[in-house]
Amino acid sequence: MIPTWIELIGVLAGLLGVVAWLPQIRKVWWDGKHDGISLPSFGLVFIALILWLIYGLLINSLAMTISNISALTCILAIIIGVLRLRRKTI
């Protein structure tokens, strides 16, 4: 079992990682801008986060599990938003 104070560090790191994606989500969903966003890069980040989520589940880390689910939600929101915007411009 991972000590609580170590998990709290993980939760804080995960929270900061998720907060970092919020400006990108705002740019795509509220401002309607998608220029400069590479879907292949975001796809790779999505796959990496899925693997980190699996790892977190395997080692029973609540911090890794919550952080990666939250980050996956953000990345998915960006990918869906970009696809929606690019479909409109075709």
Image: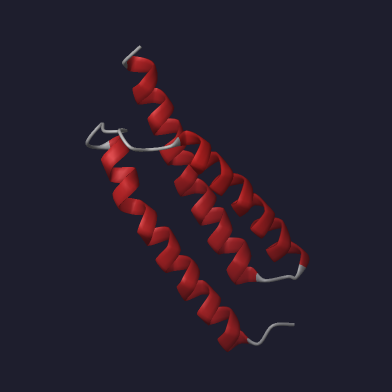
Give the residue at the far right of this rendering: 58
Residue nearest the viewer, comparing 87 with 40: 40
Residue nearest the viewer, comparing 69 with 47: 47
Q: Quadrant of residue 54?
A: bottom right
- Residue 28 horizontal/vertical position (percent): 31, 37
- Residue 48 horizontal/vertical position (percent): 62, 52
Total marks placed: 0
Give the residue at the far left of this rendering: 31
In the rendered image, the vertical position of residue 90 relative to residue 34, given as above or below: above
Q: In the rendered view of the protein, which quadrant contains the C terminus?
A: top left
Left or right, 62 with reference to 23: right
Q: Quadrant of residue 15?
A: bottom left
- Residue 55 horizontal/vertical position (percent): 72, 62
Q: In the rendered view of the protein, which quadrant contains the N terminus?
A: bottom right
Q: Quadrant of residue 66?
A: bottom right
Please report the residue visible at 54 percent of the width from the left and 49 percent of the height from the top: 72
Please report the residue visible at 47 percent of the width from the left and 35 percent of the height from the top: 39
Colour option used: secondary structure
In the rendered image, the vertical position of residue 50 relative to residue 90, given as above or below: below
- Residue 35 horizontal/vertical position (percent): 30, 33
Please report the residue visible at 34 percent of the width from the left and 24 percent of the height from the top: 85
Residue nearest the viewer, comparing 4 with 50: 50
